[in-house]
């Protein structure tokens, strides 16, 4: 029996590397899936890539309260409610030391990666309460528990959502809503291409090798490897898990 039959899942950053893979797995396990992202084109492409009638999309900027309410409302009107929320939209910002880091970029990274998650919780939790429970997974990062020179805004944001998750887990436990973080290490998506170029302008391939060498398992992870842990956390297999941080990091946190 599929593990998410009858469930409705909302995935932000649904047109990105990890979001698409989560959508694919959730749909394969029987969920109705609403992908949320910034633009129609990539979302249409994502729905086509997944190739399941159980998946649809809506455009929204997660930093905006009205647009957050709009995607929540869309899920409720289209599918009847929300059981699973994957707060996964994120941006990496730029690679610069704090002294040179552009203020507007710092604010933008915090807006997407922190405010966007908080807004999602604010409007999704009441819908889950109407269904007597649910599971929320926030995509943090190995950058949520470690420092990396050059990515202060990203690191700050990914640490912040772990605190947010812990608070939400405590507030939501009486409503049978579980809240956890998944913390990937470098995963093979667009985001790492951008960071590789940022760490070593013009020598991204060298940067990739260098980063992979620092992972105990000596390679990047795949979106599927992250989405499978997300799948565990949104399914009843993890029914006693809340308030936790789940590393998918090839051993990096052991360093
Ligand atoms: P990605 O760039 O492929 O996907 C991110 C998606 O978020 C994009 O489709 C983007 O359009 C969307 N997005 C950005 N701003 C948005 C906004 N304001 N509103 C709505 N959507 C917005 O990257 P990914 O690797 O799939 O990243 C997914 C999550 O995983 C992010 O939170 C990221 O920080 C986290 N993460 C990624 C890695 C990695 O190595 N790739 C490692 C650790 C954590």
Image (tube, helix red, strand yellow):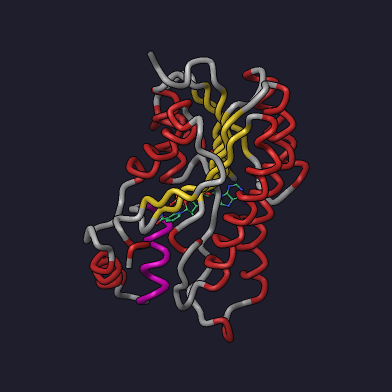
Choose top left, top right, bottom left or bottom right for residue 220: bottom left
Image position of 147 (left or right of 67): left
Vertical placement of 198 versus 56: above or below? below
Q: Quadrant of the N terminus?
A: top left
The span picked out in magenta is 189-200
Residue 48 visible here: no
Q: Quadrant of the C terminus?
A: bottom left
Q: Residue 18 at what x, y percent from top left?
A: 42, 44
Q: Residue 233 at what x, y percent from top left?
A: 47, 36
Vertical placement of 252 versus 58: above or below? below
User: What secondary structure predominates along the stretch shown in magenta?
Assistant: helix
The answer to whether residue 235 is magenta is no
In this view, the residue in front, 225 or 173, is 173
Image position of 254 (left or right of 175): left
Q: Residue at x 76, y 45 (%)?
A: 65
Residue 63 visible here: yes
Vertical placement of 255 versus 67: above or below? below
In this view, the residue in front, 53 or 40, is 53
Q: Residue 217 at what x, y percent from top left?
A: 23, 58
Q: Residue at x 44, y 48 (%)?
A: 246
In this view, the residue in front, 147 or 25, is 147
Choose top left, top right, bottom left or bottom right for residue 204: bottom left
């Amino acid at each position: 029996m599929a593990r998410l039959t009858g469930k409705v899942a909302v995935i932000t950053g649904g047109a990105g590397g990890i979001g698409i893979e989560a959508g694919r797995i959730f749909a394969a396990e029987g969920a109705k899936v609403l992908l949320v992202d910034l633009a129609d084109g990539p979302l249409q492409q994502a729905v086509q890539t997944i190739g399941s009638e159980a998946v649809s999309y809506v455009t929204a900027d997660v930093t905006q309260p009205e647009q957050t309410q709009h995607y929540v409302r869309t899920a409720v009107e289209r599918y009847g409610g929300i059981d699973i929320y994957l707060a996964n939209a994120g941006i990496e910002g730029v690679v610069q030391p704090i002294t040179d880091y552009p203020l507007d970029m710092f604010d933008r990274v915090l807006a997407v990666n922190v405010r966007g998650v908080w807004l999602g919780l604010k409007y999704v939790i009441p819908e889950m309460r109407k269904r007597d429970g649910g599971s929320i997974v926030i995509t943090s990062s190995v950058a949520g528990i470690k420092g990396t020179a050059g990515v202060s805004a990203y690191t700050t944001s990914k640490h912040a959502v772990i605190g947010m998750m812990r608070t939400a887990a405590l507030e939501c436990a009486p409503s049978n809503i579980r809240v956890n973080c998944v913390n990937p290490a470098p995963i093979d998506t667009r985001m790492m291409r951008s960071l590789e170029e940022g760490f070593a302008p013009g020598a991204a391939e060298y940067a990739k090798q260098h980063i992979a060498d620092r992972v105990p398992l000596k390679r990047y992870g795949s979106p599927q490897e992250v989405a499978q842990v997300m799948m565990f956390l949104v399914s009843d297999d993890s029914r006693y898990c809340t308030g936790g941080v789940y590393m998918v990091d090839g051993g990096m946190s052991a360093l």
